[in-house]
């Protein structure tokens, strides 16, 4: 048997089963390119924001310049409230800033006019990205206007800041301080997608094995191929994953091996139930699809209800993510977090020996 024989049989199998060819040869690269295209900018910039100026004063123009100077914002002028509201509903803009008529005059007369700021909360990422910059830009511009008014009343310049803001408040995010959504979201998304690809490719192997071959003999080839793509993905997206440049990548790659143990065990258990392929795919997806939610990225796992914490412990990627985060300088490598992944190993071995 020549060395090219296994590759030739793999190619013949891929041609006879387009779905498996997609899972093994196309989907890893397609998902990687898609995630890279989305997160290569690292943080959303120049998001369209509707600007409705009904005051047409020097102050409103200053507010407009303050918003334009923010990298995350690109103002889109609208002439009336109806067109501005419709643009927000259609998703053409993600937020709306409206300066009412006589806004500047009311401020000069000591009144408290309302500056209308709205954002579309349905777009969670965009709304979160715009909320703080809009508030800060408007607050700075209005504070400068207030300082001029206080100085005009004869207050010494040294006392202006204490008069405008007697208590200074600083808000510092514990996670994602630089609003870098690549480093914040990409690790969890990559793990969630990759483990689904591993599960589906193993399930499909047992339902559509190579002609004249037993699935068990090809299980190692399927796992090795997915493991190899994952290693290339770690190397290719090293900068986006914020892995330290002086840190070796091979430990992260080797740590994916225990991550495949529970995924393989789950696939073999589902196959052993004898149900149809569509039912098994749905069952596996029901467990792994919510993985991103339970990894503790958008909400700390310790703050979740007890049942949700148990569910998070059942998801394999939840045990690997702390190791990946440690390679970004967020602490020592928690290798002991991986030991639960090896618990299903006897089950996977037993099922592999008894399935064809």
Image (cartoon, rainbow, N blue to C red):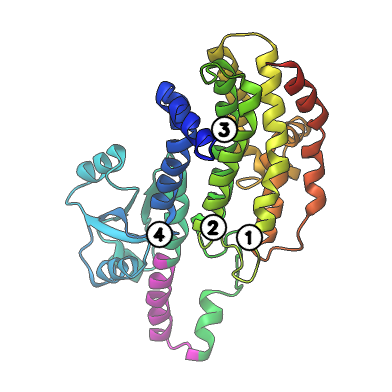
Q: Which residue is mark 3?
A: 196
Q: Crowdedness of circle 1 by 10 Å Cα count: few (<14), some, many (20+)?
A: some
The residues tagged by marks 3 and 2 sit, at their Cα atoms, a distance apart of 20 Å
Q: Earlier in the sequence, mark 1 or mark 2?
A: 2
SS category of the residue bearing label 4: loop
Q: Is the C terminus in the top left, top right, bottom left or bottom right quadrant? A: top right
| Distance CA(mark 4)–CA(mark 1) | 23 Å
Q: Is residue 171 visible?
A: yes
Residue in front for this viewpoint, 209 or 115: 209
Q: Is residue 274 left or right of residue 351?
A: left
Left or right of residue 317, residue 103 in this image: left
- Give the answer, above or below, for where 132 lies relative to 15: below
Q: Nearer the viewer, mark 4 or mark 1?
A: 1
Mark 3 or mark 2: name the one nearer the start of the chain.
3
| Location of residue 59 by image quarter | bottom left
Kindly identify which residue carries mark 1.
249
Q: Looking at the picture, how far across and down is residue 182, in whole percent?
A: 50, 55
| Dot 3: element | helix
Picture coordinates of residue 6 (x, y %)?
53, 34
Give the mark, 4 or 3, whose residue is nearer the N terminus: 4
At 54% from the left edge and 33% from the top edge, which residue is drawn?
197
Which residue is at the front of the view, 139 or 26? 26
The dominant secondary structure in magenta is: helix
Q: Residue furthest left?
A: 79
Numbered disc in front, either 3 or 2: 2
**In the image, is residue 327 part of the stretch drawn in magenta?**
no
Which residue is denoted by mark 2 in the rendering?
235
The local crowd at label 2, few if under 14, some if 14 to 19, many if 20 or more residues have their Cα within 10 Å, is some
* Real-space Cα separation, disc 4 to disc 3, in angstroms: 26 Å
- The residue pinned by badge 4 equals 41
Looking at the rendering, in which quadrant would you find the N terminus? Answer: top right
Disc 4 from disc 2: Cα separation: 18 Å
């Amino acid at each position: 048997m020549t060395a090219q024989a296994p590759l030739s049989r793999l190619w013949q199998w891929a041609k006879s089963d387009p779905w498996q060819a997609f899972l093994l040869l196309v989907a890893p690269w397609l998902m990687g390119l898609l995630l890279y295209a989305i997160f290569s900018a690292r943080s959303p910039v120049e998001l369209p924001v509707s600007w409705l100026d009904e005051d047409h004063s020097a102050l409103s123009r200053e507010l407009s310049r303050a918003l334009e100077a923010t990298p995350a914002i690109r103002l889109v002028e609208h002439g009336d409230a109806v067109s501005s509201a419709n643009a927000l509903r259609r998703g053409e803009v993600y937020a709306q800033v409206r300066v009412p008529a006589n806004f500047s005059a009311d401020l000069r007369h000591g009144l408290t006019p309302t500056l209308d700021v709205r954002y579309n909360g349905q777009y969670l990422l965009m709304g979160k990205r715009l909320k703080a910059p809009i508030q800060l830009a408007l607050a700075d511009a209005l504070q400068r206007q207030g300082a001029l008014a206080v100085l005009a009343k004869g207050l010494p310049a040294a006392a202006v800041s204490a008069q405008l803001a007697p208590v200074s408040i600083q808000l510092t995010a514990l996670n994602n301080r630089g609003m870098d959504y690549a480093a914040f979201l990409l690790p969890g998304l990559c793990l969630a997608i990759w483990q689904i690809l591993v599960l589906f490719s193993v399930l499909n192997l047992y339902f559509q094995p190579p002609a004249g071959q037993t699935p068990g003999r090809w299980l190692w080839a399927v796992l090795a191929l997915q493991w190899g793509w994952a290693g290339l993905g770690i190397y290719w997206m090293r900068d986006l994953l914020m892995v330290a440049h002086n840190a070796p990548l091979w430990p992260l790659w080797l740590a994916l091996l225990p991550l495949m143990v529970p995924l393989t065990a789950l696939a073999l258990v589902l196959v052993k139930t004898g149900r149809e392929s569509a039912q098994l795919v749905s069952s596996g997806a029901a467990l792994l699809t919510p993985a991103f939610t339970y990894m503790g990225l958008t909400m700390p796992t310790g703050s979740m209800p007890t049942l949700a914490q148990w569910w998070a412990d059942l998801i394999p990627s939840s045990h690997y993510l702390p190791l990946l985060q440690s390679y970004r300088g967020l602490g020592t490598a928690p290798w002991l977090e991986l030991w639960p992944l090896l618990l299903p190993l006897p089950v996977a071995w037993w099922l592999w020996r008894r399935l064809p």
